Amino acid sequence: MSAVYKDKTLLFEEAAAAFAALPADRSAMKAKERVAIPSQDMPHQDPDVRRHNTEEVALGYSREQAIVEAARCLQCKNAPCVKGCPVEIDIPGFVQAIADGDFLKAVGIIKTVSLLPAICGRVCPQESQCQANCTVGKSLKDVDKSVAVGRLERFVADYEREHGQIKAPAVKPETGKKVAVIGSGPAGLVVAADVRREGHHVTIFEAFHKLGGVMVYGIPEFRLPKAIVQREIDTLKEMGVEIKTNFVVGRTRKLKDLLEKDGYDAVFIGTGAGLPTFMGIEGENLVGVFSANEYLTRANLMKAYAKGKAFTPIYNSKKVAVLGGGNVAMDAARSALRLGAEEVHIVYRRTEVEMPARKEEAVNAKEEGVQFHMLQNAKRILGDEKGRVVGMECVRYELGEPDSSGRRRPVEIPNSEFVMDVDTVIVAIGNSSNPLIKQTTAELETTKWGNIVTDENQKTSLDRVYAGGDIVLGAATVILAMGEGRKAAAAINAQLA
Amino acid sequence: MNRIVDKKFLSENVFQLRVEAPLIASERKPGQFVILSLDNDFAERIPLTIADADPAEGTITLVVQKVGGTTTALSRLETGDKIVNLLGPLGRPTDIEKRGRVVAVGGGVGAAPLYPIVQALKQAGNHLTVILGARSRDLIVFEDKMRALADNLIVCTDDGSHGRKCLVTAPLKEICESEKPDLAVAIGPPIMMKFCCETTRPFGVHTVVSLNTIMVDGTGMCGGCRVTVGGQTKFVCVDGPEFDGHLVDFDNMMKRMGAYREQEQEFLHKCQLDQKIEESRPK
C-alpha cells in the first residue's frame, strides 16, 4: 500500500513501462530479477471522492499490471503459498498462466477448487494466508511486497465475467435425489453447486428476500459489488438449482419435515453467525446504538443509502463511534461516512497490531477520514431525556502480559475515564450463533455457545444432516465457510452415491 | 403465493387482508408474526402479527392500521395483488395451557393478534373475559368474533361512542379486584400495555404482553428489536414476541420505537404528495 495516493492512470502507466521492460523470454528470468520487478499497487478511487459514494473502492488491475505482478512469482517448488490457502488452490499454476497471458486458463485452475474467485479475490485475508508465506515477500522482508495472489485472482475472475466467459459447470444426469441447503451465504452456495454437479436436485432455502447471506447484507457494495454475487447466483440458477426465498427452515417448515415429509435425502445447514453480540454495558439500548449487523443491513440490503427512495430509514448520525477492530467494524465505519456522518471513530481496546481487520481495510478507512482510537473502550453510553445517545464514556487501557491467544492482554488504567462526544454507537464486537434452527430442532447437538457440532466430514449428530460455515466455526471468513461447504458437499455426494 | 384473496376496510385507517400462504397457514401458532415487504429493492420489511389462519384454504389473515409508508402502500393493494415478500411464521408461539380465569385486553388493532390467542386459550378450557378498547367506535375491531368466543366481553372507548366510556384499565382493575384472574394477556399500543401491567402488578396477576418493535430481518440477525426485560437485553423476534409484562422496560421500548419518527413522517408526507399527484393526472 503506497503512502501517497496514486491514481489509476498513473499506476497503469507505470505498469505499462514495467511490462515493456520485461524480457521477451521470461521463462529464463532469474529469481533475483523477478524479485526486482516492482510490485503492483491496487488502483483505488480517490479517498476524497469515494467517501461520498458507494461504488467499489478497489478498481482492479490492468492487463499489464496483472502480467507484471505474475512475473514476480518464483514458482517455488514447495509452494508455501498453497499451504496458506484454506482450499489449497494451485497458486503457482494459476499465476504462471497469468504471466503467460492466458487468463481463462488461470481462472479455470482456480475454479477446480474454489467456486467464487471474484468474491474471494476481494474479501479473503490473503496477507495472513497465501501471501503470508510468499518467498518474494520474505526475501523483501515485507509481506505487503508478496506476490499479490488475491489481486491476481480477482483480475482473472473479473476478466472471465467481463468477457462473458463464465460457463455454468456441467451437471450430470438427474439422479432423482434431493438435497436441501439452508442459507445462501458462501458455504451454502458452494454446497449447492458441488451437489448439483453430481446430478442431484438442490433447493436453497433463504430467509431473506435476496440470496447471498453476509455477502449481500453485511459486506458493503464499495468492497464487494452485489452484481458480482448475483452473477454467481445466476450461475447456480443456470445449473438448475431451485431457490426458495422468504423461507426460514425451523419456522416455515421444520428441518425434520424436509427429510421425513418433503423427500429430501440430505440437508446442509449454513445459517451463519447471525446473532449480534453486545457489550453488556449501561446505555446499550438507547436510541442511536446499533449492532453492526443492523446498521449494515439497513445500509446494504435495504439500500438506505438511497435517501428519498428507500423505505428503510437510517439514523441521522453526525458523530459516530464504532466499537471493535475487525473487518465488520471497518465496514460499518466506512458506511457511516458514506451515509453522511461528519466524524467517525473506531474505538478498540488493544492496538492496531492486534486488530483483526485486514490491514488494507484499516488503511482504506484511515484514508477516507475514519479516526482510530486505540487502547480505549466504552464503559457506558450516555443518553438524554429522550433516550437518545449524547455521548460515550470510555476508559483507557494499556497492554499487559500475553493471554491464551498470544496477544498481549489489554489492562484497564484506573481513573482514566473520559467522555467522547458522539450521537451514534455501532457495536461491532462479533456474532454468536443464530438460535432458530436449534430452537426448533431440539435433537441437534450444539456447543454451549450454540454452534452446531460436526465430525470431520461436516456431519452433525443427526442422520443425513450436515452443517458448515459460521454456524459451526463461529464468526470466521468467506473462504473458511467455502472450505467447509466443499467438505460437506463431498460427504453428501458420497452418501447419495 | 402471497396473493391477496380478500381485502376489506374495517374502518377508515384499518384494513383486513386474507393472503394465500399455505405453508404459513399450516405452521403458524397463536402469537406468531410474519415479516413482509412490497418489493425487492427499496421496500422496508415490517412485522405484522397473524390475526387468523385457515389451513384448509391455505390463507392467513392480517389486520393492519395505516401508520407509515409501508402500511399505507399495503392499504392500496387490492384483491388479486401479491405481497412480494412474506416470511413466517416467526417468533415463539404463545404458551397455551389451562390456567383457569383469563382476562385478555385488546387495544385498537391489537384485538386482531389477540384473537388466535383467545381462541386457543378458550379451547384449552379457560374462562375468558375479553376487554376491547379504542379511542372511538370505528377503531374497535373483531368485536363480533370475540363475542362468539368470550365468556364475558367488555367494550370501552375513550370518547364513549361505543360501550363504556373509559380506558381498558378501568374494567381490568375491577376484574382483578373481583375475581383475581390467573392470567392476563394484553396486546395493543405500548402505552396501553404499560398501564395494563401497572394495573395488574399490585394484584400479582401474571401478565403477558406481545411486543411489536422495529425489526429488519425478524430472525435474530440485526438486534434492532431488542428490549430490556428484567434488566436483560432480549430480542423480540427470537426471544419473544411475548414477554412477562411486569419485567418489560416500556419507557425504553417506546423511545426506541420512536427512533425514526421524524424521518417516517417526512417520508410519509412525500408518499402522500406523490399519491395526490398520481391521482390528479388525467386518466
Image (spheres, rainbow, N blue to C red):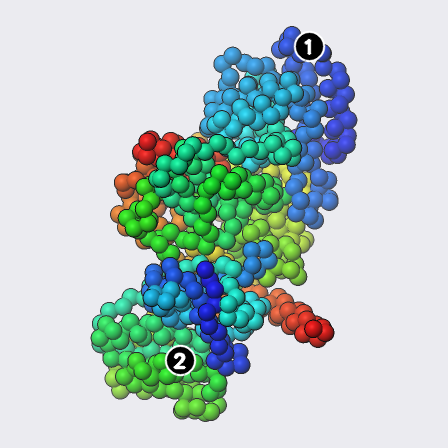
Say what amino acid the circle numbered 1 marks.
Asp
Q: Chain of mark 2?
A: B
Residue shown at the point (52%, 28%) measured from the top left:
A111
Q: Position of residue A206 (x, y in %)?
A: 45, 49
Considering only vertical position in the picture, is B113 above or below B137?
Answer: above
Q: In the drawing, does residue A239 fall left or right of residue A165?
A: left
Indicate the secondary structure of the residue bearing disc 1. Answer: loop
Q: Is residue B50 above or below residue A394?
A: below
- Identify which residue is drawn at 53% across, 71% down: B78
State the mark number for residue A25. Answer: 1
At horizontal 46% and vertical 36% (from top left) the residue drawn is A193
In the rendered image, the quadrant that contains the C terminus of chain B is: bottom right
The answer to whether marks 2 and 1 sit on the same chain is: no
Dot 2: few (<14), some (14–19), or many (≥20) neighbours within 10 Å? many
Which percent across, then down, holds residue A105? Answer: 58, 23
Relative to B52, say whether A353 is above or below.
above
Say what secondary structure mark 2 lies in. loop
| Residue bearing the label numbered 2 | B142
- B103 relative position to B98: left or right: right
* Occupied quadrant, residue A32: top right
- Residue A167 appearing in the image: yes
Q: Describe residue A391's horizontal placement relative to residue A195 as left or right.
A: right
